[in-house]
Image: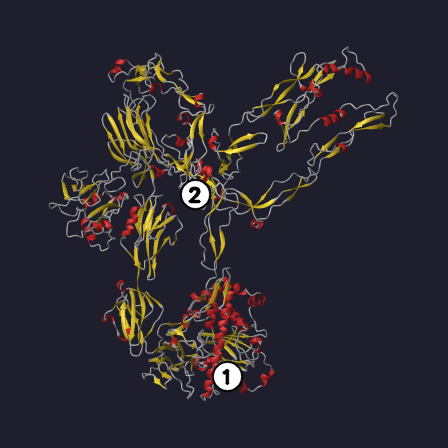
Amino acid sequence: MEGCRWTTAGTLLLASLVLSSRTARSEEDRDSLWDAWGSWSECSRTCGGGASYSLRRCLSSKTCEGRNIRYRTCSNVDCPPEAGDFRAQQCSAHNDVKYQGQFYEWLPVSNDLENPCSLKCQAKGTALVVELAPKVLDGTRCYTESLDMCISGLCQIVGCDHQLGSAVKEDNCGVCNGDGTTCRLVRGQYKSQLSANKLDDMVVAIPYGSRQIRLMLKGPDHLYLETKTLQGVKSENSLSSTGSFLVENSSISFQKLPDKEILRIPGPLTADFTIKIRYAGAADSSVQFIFYQPIVHRWRETDFFPCSASCGGGYQLTSAECFDLRSSRVVADQYCHYYPENIKPKPKLQECNLDPCPARWESTPWTACSSSCGGGIQSRSVSCVEEDMQGHISPVEEWKCMYTPKMPVVQPCNIFDCPKWLAQEWSPCTVTCGQGLRYRVVLCIDHRGMHTGGCTPKTKPHIKEECIVPTPCYKPKEKLPVEAKLPWYKQAQELEEGAMVSEEPSFIPEAWSTCSVTCGVGSQVRLVKCQVLLSFSQSVADLPIDECEGPKPVSQRACYSGPCNGEATEYTPEESELLYGSLQEFDELYDWEYEGFTECSESCGGGVQEAVVTCLNKQTRETVDETLCVTSRRPPQLLKACSLDPCPPRWEIGKWSTCSLTCGVGLQTRDVFCSHLLSRETNETIVLADELCYTPKPSLVQACNRFDCPPSWYPTEWQECSQTCGSGVQKRDMLCKQHLVDGSLLELPETFCSTPRPVTQQVCKNEDCPSEWLLSDWTQCSVSCGEGTQSRNAICRKMLKTGHFVINSSLCPPLPFSSLTRPCALDTCTRHNRPVHKQSPHIMAIKKVYIQTRKQKKLHFVVGGYAYLLPKTSVNLRCPTRRFRKSMITWEKDDKRLISSAHITITPYGLIKINRLKPSDTGTYTCTAGPVQEHFVIKLIGSNKIIARQPASIREEETMRKPSLNEALRTEEKHVNRILFNGSKAEKRGHLVDPSRWYDYIVSRLIQYRGWPGENLASWEAQESTERNASSEEDQSREYSLPFTMITEQKRLDDIISNLSQQPEELKDVYTEQLVVQLAQEVFKSHLEHQESVIRASRKGLDTTSMEHPVHRHVSGFTSSLRTSSAEAFLPTSVDPVNGLRRPHRKPAILRKISAAQQLSASEVVTHLGQTVVLASGTLSVLLHCEAVGNPKPTISWAKNGEEVEYNERMLLQPDDSLQILEPVEADVGFYACNASNALGSDSVSIAVTLAGKPLIKASRATVINTESPAVTVDIGSTVKTIQRVNVTISCQVAGVPEAEVTWFKNKVKLSFAHHLHDGLLLIPNVSLSDQGLYSCKAANLRGEVTESSQLLVLEPPRPLPYLKDLTAVLSSAGTSAHSVLTSSSGTNMTISPGSSALIGCAVDGHPTPNITWLYSGKPLSLQHRLLAAGRILQILNVSDAPDGEFSCLAQNEAGLLTQKASLAIQEYQWSADKLMACSASCGHKGVQLPQLMCLLDGAEVNISYCKEKPKPALQPIACNRRDCPSRWMVTSWSPCTRSCGGGIQIRRVTCQRLTVKGNSVPMSNEACAQVSKRPVDTQNCNRQPCVEWVASSWGQCNGPCIGPRLAVQHRQVFCQTKDGISVSSDQCSSLPRPLSTQNCWTDLCGVHWRVSLWTVCTATCGNYGFQSRRVDCVHIRTNKPVMEHHCSWRPRPANWQRCNITPCENVECRDTTRYCEKVKQLKLCQLTQFKSRCCGTCGKA
């Protein structure tokens, strides 16, 4: 069954009848005697629309009104394409059932009008139609093209909203319950125009999303389609035959009939369709089309723009943008204006950033500078101010602004140098002999080196001085200096007179022209320009004359060119004065006169006019240049008043504020208010209501900075910290975005942002982490067979929020002993029976490390270890062997054969003696017994407690820098790991390859350790020659009474090295220190215990003088209670200390005593193991005995409830290993276990101590995971995780007096006795998933009861499944384009096309649910992919990324792992050109056939886009239909119409022609074409509409309704008529501009206004019920007499009644609380609740 799941209605009905949960009954249901409706049933389908129902029952014995069942639709989502038809699925369900003795394949019969809800099916290939069921399943569609569905055999109406009984339908645009405004109807007609060189033509382009498309072609031609998807993929469909098919996922129905073709597409189209026509006959064709085209450009409201203020209350507006629904992007507004249906939404306004602004520094403007140059100062006042929500600014205390620095109040200004005079070099003297003059140029230069003004004239250097040439002159008449001529004099004069262009507009005169006459008096003119220097370009620009201030230099003057008689005359000064005096007559030709007044300076409110004074030529009365008139005779200024009428109200406009944004789109605001000028002299104005200003109010807001912002970084939110405590990091992303002018954010590549990328990671400091124990790995088992122990180290670490670590054991709670030491069990040791064949020799080496701490004469050792000894100590080194003659033993030192000497003696029984060690004795001693060897390393301890002959690297590292261990660990780490984890068996037993440098380092740290209890180790070597003179007896007594040598196992040092190599680099030094401290404490404890055992042995009278005691001994890493003599530890068979007999080896065994606890007295209890001790109120002491036998002698330790007993003043360990509890308390209650162990194994027995006989259960808190063993036994309290088919035994050891009864429970349900076994054991045989649960053991007696529980979890290793239901559903929902395959253990193969996606399912199961990891070619995935269905489905987005290789899914849980595989094979696309397209022409010379290019995959045609990467094959056209065409009519285009209106004609030329096979068009007789088709017309009428125009009557009287002051309306008639004067419908003139039919006019009748009297006194002073009234009349402005009120209707009538004093009686006045209330009122937002209260003052105005 594909896609959808369905059930029978009967099953659903039965299931719902047993529903026990009912919703609460409503009051209405209770009154009508109905029970509450039940819950809804499961949907009858999972997709495609199903039905669900709910039931209720009648609670009365009578009949209840109404129905007991109700329905609703459900699962209203489309089914995947491969799901198939729901009715077809029901028919196919009968394929396996014989009908009349025969099997049929049944197909659905749809759209049965008589009974649409019966299941009628037709046998495939026959006409047999049978009703296989009276009712189809609920949810089946009644008809294929309808949403109506069958429920209980009846067809129910379903609307497009998928609701039962709904009549809602889709509109023509496909919108459910729409109004049809999202699309438009397009209809039209196309007519073919035959052309000799055109084979096809476009009919219509139908865009994406169009619906209800219908085209009908009439004629001999053919339709075909071209499509283009939104991705740009183009294709073509020839529509060659009748049928229904899919084109670009759009369903198409095409009918091809002899005389016409019909194309129907219901839509919506999923691509752009172009309908084309291919010419095929001589006759014309026509195409009619109709469809609904979507409006793809719609207005969309934007988000609010940024707030106009960052604090203190601002506002923000929305806008509207034109949105393209196809491309999902914003386009230009004109796209939306194209559709009249689109109405642009109005902007919205809201307040924002209402938090008050913090106090800020406010400054006044700077004062003018005290000096214009040379350095001055300017000052200002700075105060701290606050701005409230209304914009009022008030000063506050300065401390409120101290969060920012105070602005300076004084600053220097104009610090540049003042202009200075700069004199140029002197010119040469003007004479060549005697006395003359010389000149120089003097300039005023500013600090920039520019020629400027501003220098003090008094200090100007002179520009002219006398000069003497020391050559005598021979012309005595020349006594006075001669004035200089050009060029110097001219240059100096021009620099004096000329003006320089500056950065301020100024008048710049040019040079005077030559005199207008060559003799006599004439005139000169010059140009005077207004110019400015542009500083940025250093160029001069011309300005209008009125831009320059100050008097304009004269542009005309008189000039005299000498007498006109042609003689050169030299005038004396007197003559010159006489001559120029005559020019006074020349001046009197011109005089000043008044000529009218200027315009009034103001248009209202009083202004002034100035009389215009001009210079006139008295003779011609023409105006001349003012320079021709004498300035001193200019008449005085004459003024008069003007425009005395008062000004009307007008808008006062403030300056625009600065833009709220520097880019994007910001906002600027300004103040605009209506004001009235009362007096221009006093400049007194009053503010009026906006209504009194008649002109439109200028805008308050405008957009600014409307350009795109530069790309910048936009941070995302910080992610959570990587650590919940301590120092972690948090990250964020930085996106490069650009804020566009339309308000949107465009994400760009990072390279577009030029500024440095802000930080994306920062340290996040949390609280300090709680202290925690860091545990090392477990050491190897202490034994090679049987039962032993494992240990590990612990360090208490606390991470601070700064990221640093604190190492301190006191910070953590005490660790139980069991967490640092645990038992281990290996294979059972084999007995050493007599060998049946010869075995190889064996050296019984002891792997220990010895450190000598005090001077001693002689020490004994066995090979296999390391010894760090003091100088001058004698050494006996034995090499004990088995199966080898001791006389054959050979010795080597540092790989060189040893020979006996006076210093080193080699004995015949495998012993060497070294007399008084010296530095040359250090090295490695090797004992060789046949094929086997063992070594012993001796090193000397120097005077500075550093080991002699230490490797240089270690020595330098230790002495020079403390963190040196890090490098040492790094260099050896790889080698150590190989030895410890990958080495040979010999290496794993402790034979490290040259571990000496590690041992040296650890031993040197141990010797330097200063924390030894008891004695100061500085006295280790403080023994002088007096000790050497002492007797051997003294040495021997000291040997056994003092701690001469510290001993530990090599294994212990190897564990330390292994732990160090696995620690993080930054913690290795800390770990070294911690581990050395622990090692020192263990070594010291072993010394104390050894000394204690020696003392105890001496008390028993043991004669020890005859025995040779080696100093080595077995020391466990953390076991502090070892009590074995050194002799018993190393001998292969221990010696009985009493009789010297050898005893065989034996595992420990604890003696069980059956006798009850012995009551020595009323307060003391003595008992053996296996008993129960009941503590009474008078019990003062409890002694627990533990006796064990074994060889070597077992070591005894005690544990309580699984944790090592901590000894104190109440908890004592007696010398015979008994445990004594003094003054027992309730906390001492529990199970005490005595543990006995030696090298061969261990034994443990428990004893219970209870209080007043209350039951006690021995519980564990361990977690046991079993994946292999067939049986598991655990203590109650443990958590058990095991595979299936395993026998699980749970032990519940109970103690109590009287004896407690044990009861077992599973999930709190009591178990039957069939499960019980003896001694409180519960056996769960052959465990399965049904056995999972919580098992509880309850022990009860008369004193009380106690319960402990264990959780049993059953593990199931991952296993493959043939299919997985939910996986199949996910795979099918991905659609037909995705290929899917399931993995298998042997590997599944699937062929797939390149570039497509693939879904690979991993069908596995297990318990707990396996974690799935996907691999490609055995490596983690690196190609693009997605994980679906909790990782069980791998989606490869593009299989071309994985050309070869195998995909595998690794399923893993606690019970095991499973690998499933699948491989994908990619098959290539290829081009094919085997088929030919239809001929392009039916006749003529251009007919060709092109090979049809197809894209093939495995022989099947696919979309050509798949082959676009492949090179196309060369296509050669093939000629076809090359023959003469039949005769056919050919027409030209119609000529223009002879008249534009009133009826004209058009003509065209019609000829009969035939196209030959050579391409020539041959004229034929009309009869030849007439036999084929009717001759087309060559003349037709055009523009038959009558000629019309608009005609208007004269204007009526100005007596219409008043629309303004003195303003009314007058009317006239406008009608449409022909040129002949016949009136016609106005529609015929609609294309012509229509004249106005109404206009405004002036009339005194409308000079009216509303006159109001004063308000009466309010009837109440507060509350909600006060009111007042006034008189309102419409009166004439001039006569002030009342007129009819309708004359004043152009202005709102003022209210004549109003509420007053509507305030709470506490006299709280209503006022605005925001500055933007005027804007709120302007946008008509006062009705909104949030503004009605905040702007109650403004919004409450009339």
Coordinates of residue 940 in the picture (x, y in percent): 55, 75
Quadrant (top left/top right/bottom left/bottom right) for the C terminus: top left
The location of residue 1151, given as percent across then percent down, is 35, 82
The single residue placed furthest to the top in the displayed view is 565
Label 1 neighbour load within 10 Å: few <14, some 14-19, many 20+:
some
Instruction: Tell me which amino acid carries mark 1.
Output: Tyr
User: Residue 1083 versus residue 537: which sits nearer the camera?
Assistant: 537
Compare residues 521 and 1086 and report the one nearer the observer. Answer: 521
Query: Which of the 4 image quarters holds residue 634?
Result: top right
Q: Is residue 1411 left or right of residue 45?
A: right
The x, y position of residue 828, in whole percent, is 35, 74
For the residues marked 2 and 1, what is the alpha-carbon distance in whole angstroms? 112 Å
Residue 808 seen: yes
Above/below status of 589 relative to 1041: above
Which quadrant of the structure image shows residue 1299?
bottom left
Question: In front here: 1022 or 1628?
Answer: 1628
For this view, does 878 lie left or right of residue 1520?
Answer: right
Residue type at tag 2: Cys
Q: Secondary structure at mark 2?
A: loop
Q: Earlier in the sequence, mark 2 or mark 1?
A: 1
- Kindly report which numbered mark, 2 or 1, lies closer to the viewer in this rendering: 2
> 1414 or 815, which is in the foreground?
815
Counting from the top left corner in percent of width and height, residue 1579 is at: 31, 14
The residue depicted at 73 percent of the width and 31 percent of the height is 443
Which numbered disc covers residue 1040? 1
Q: Which mark is residue 1170?
A: none
Q: Secondary structure at mark 1?
A: helix
Asked where in the image residue 776 lies, by quadrant, the reply is bottom left
Residue that label 2 marks: 1662
- Verify CB contact (< 8 Å) between mark 2 and mark 1: no
